Amino acid sequence: MRVQCVICDKIEELNDDTLQAKRLRNRPIHTHMCDACHERISERTKERLATGSFRFYRSSRRIEDDF
C-alpha cells in the first residue's frame, strides 16, 4: 500500500498486512506520518515540555502510552 506523509509529502510503501495499513484503509481520517517527521515532532515537543511554559493536554491513556 502506498501512503503519503501529511507533512513532507514523502511517498512510502507499507505492507498491506500491518495494523497501520488496515487503519488507513478502514478509517480515512487516520493520517500517515513518515518516521523522520514523527521523530522531529516528538523531539521538539519534548523540548517544549522541558521549558515548563508549554501546556500539553493529554486526551487519553492509550495515546499517552504511545507518546
Image (tube, grey):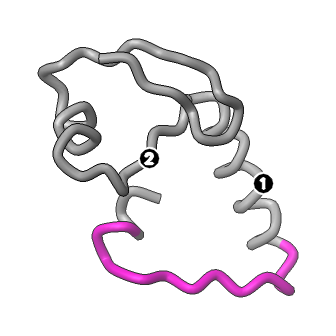
Secondary-structure class at tag 1: helix
Dot placed on the residue nearer the N-terminal end, 2 or 1: 2
Direction front: furthest residue: 28
Name the disc covering residue 16, or none: none
Q: Mark 1 is on which residue type?
A: Arg
Q: Position of residue 58 (x, y in %)?
A: 49, 82
36 up-or-down from 25: above or below:
above
Q: Give the number of the mark in front: 2 or 1.
A: 2
Q: Is residue 11 left or right of residue 52?
A: left
What is the spatial separation of the Cα atoms under label 2 and label 1, in whole angstroms?
20 Å
Tally the marks.
Answer: 2
Residue at 52 percent across and 27 percent down: it is 4
Q: Is residue 34 left or right of residue 30?
A: right
Residue at 42 percent across and 83 percent down: it is 59
Instruction: Work out whether residue 13 or residue 46 is closer to the camera in this orientation and state it.
Output: 13
Instruction: Work out whether residue 56 or residue 10 is closer to the camera in this orientation and state it.
Output: 10
Name the disc covering residue 44, or none: 1
Residue at 44 percent across and 46 percent down: it is 31
Query: Magenta residues?
Result: 51-63
Residue 62 within the segment the image draws in magenta: yes
Q: Which residue is mark 2?
A: 31
Instruction: Work out whether residue 21 or residue 55 is closer to the camera in this orientation and state it.
Output: 21
Instruction: Work out whether residue 11 or residue 65 is closer to the camera in this orientation and state it.
Output: 11
Secondary-structure class at tag 2: loop
Q: Residues within 10 Å of mark 1 (few under 14, many from 20)?
A: few
Q: Position of residue 9 (x, y in %)?
A: 65, 28
67 up-or-down from 35: above or below:
below
